[in-house]
Amino acid sequence: MKITGIQTFRTSTPVHKTAGTNWLFVRIDTDAGISGWGEGSLQYKDAALEAEINDFGNYLVGKDPRRIEHVWTSMYRRVTWTGGAVTMSAIAAIDLALWDVKAKALGIPVYELAGGPTRSPVPVYANGWFEDLTEPVPGQPAETAARMASPEMHARAAAELKDAGWPALKFYPFGGPQVITPDRIDHGIELVRAVRDAVGPGMEIGIDMRARLDPWSAKRVARRLEEFNIAWLEEPILWDNPKAFGEFVRSVNVPVSTGEQLYNRWDFEPLLEEDVVGIVQPDICHAGGFSELRKIASAAETHYVSVAPHNSNGPISTLASLHLDMSIPNSFMQEIFVSFFDRYNELLTSPLVIEDGATVPPDGPGWGADINEDVLSQYPPTDFTQIESEPYMAF
């Protein structure tokens, strides 16, 4: 079997953070008539990502798509400059498509190709459930607008999730700039208290701070969060310095997670060596794809760390993450954006179904579903301006 072509597709997302995000998919075609789908959605870096994928595509044509490890290593090692968000996202998109091709050729799901299920179904947690609490504000991220919604509105929305069977939720009650103020702490705590009171002690709550705060501010917040028995505090501070991150985690009394902006096993190694993080959150679209997340998960397992793949991307990212969750022994939960869910099922040729707070990929070989190209054309990609269109407005 040989690769005959590689094609990229971009489509706009539902409003999330700002209106400028796109999803980017890759389809790899073969002379056996089998095509595989991948995704490398890298918010606001479409042009660079698409160019990197196309350059790799020139190398891929004529290669055997079943030699996944060889292709991955060639794209990572046989180049003059490697690593980083753009290259690793391009590798991820291609890697995902190759796993899809090989599993389809064998007539089995990807999780079977990866060794079979260790769990089924996969428990999920809800993100994006707060995005309709307030009217969108032009130029303002949805999470910022949501923080302005009342505690009562947050409580009602969280209770609806619990009633629908979701076992866990995540949200963003604290924002930047990095040096926090008492009124911002109090406002965020009011939102957390309202949600905890609404869902009771049995539902898990994750608090994501998106690295918006400095260590001094994040410690103040963490101290106030102890009474709510949160499941994890996500990216409380910046991720660049593992030693500083380790010192922070050792100074607080709440569980901490991180990892969405680390791009391969070598990036995760110094973080894991700190032995402080209970959950790592690599993104399957950015950290080298299915192949690399399996290796990151194995490294995490040696430190008794769970894996909860970050997933603010599109439907292929979601399906691939679920196949990973099913095939590794240390998966925790899978992030699902409820605000994206309807669009996922518009774009997929087979729907994803969530029941009682858990899900499995659709039945079938590969990921279990392809992208419906006719639907893609209904949502043309959005134009944006890097930095000005992005949600990180205050540091």
Image (spheres, rainbow, N blue to C red):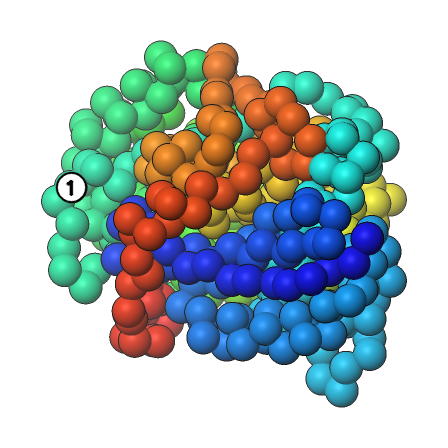
Q: How many marks?
A: 1
- For the C terminus, the quadrant is bottom left
Residue type of the residue flagged with mark 1: Thr
Q: Nearer the viewer, residue 27 or 238?
A: 27
Q: Is residue 131 above or below residue 285?
A: above
Residue 58: x %, y % from top left: 68, 75
Q: Is residue 161 above or below residue 17?
A: above
Question: Of helix, strand and loop, which one carries label 1?
Answer: loop
Identity of the residue drawn at 33% across and 67% down: 390
Side (left or right) of 113 relative to 227: right
Identity of the residue drawn at 68% across and 19% down: 120
Side (left or right) of 75 relative to 13: right
Q: Nearer the viewer, residue 77 or 65?
A: 65
Residue at the spot of label 1: 134
Q: Quadrant of residue 114?
A: top right
In this orientation, does residue 48 appear? yes
Q: Nearer the viewer, residue 60 or 223?
A: 60
Residue 222: x %, y % from top left: 48, 46
Q: Is residue 280 above or below residue 11?
A: above
Q: Nearer the viewer, residue 193 or 52?
A: 52
Identity of the residue drawn at 68% across and 46% down: 33
Residue 309: x %, y % from top left: 61, 43
In this orientation, does residue 197 appear? no
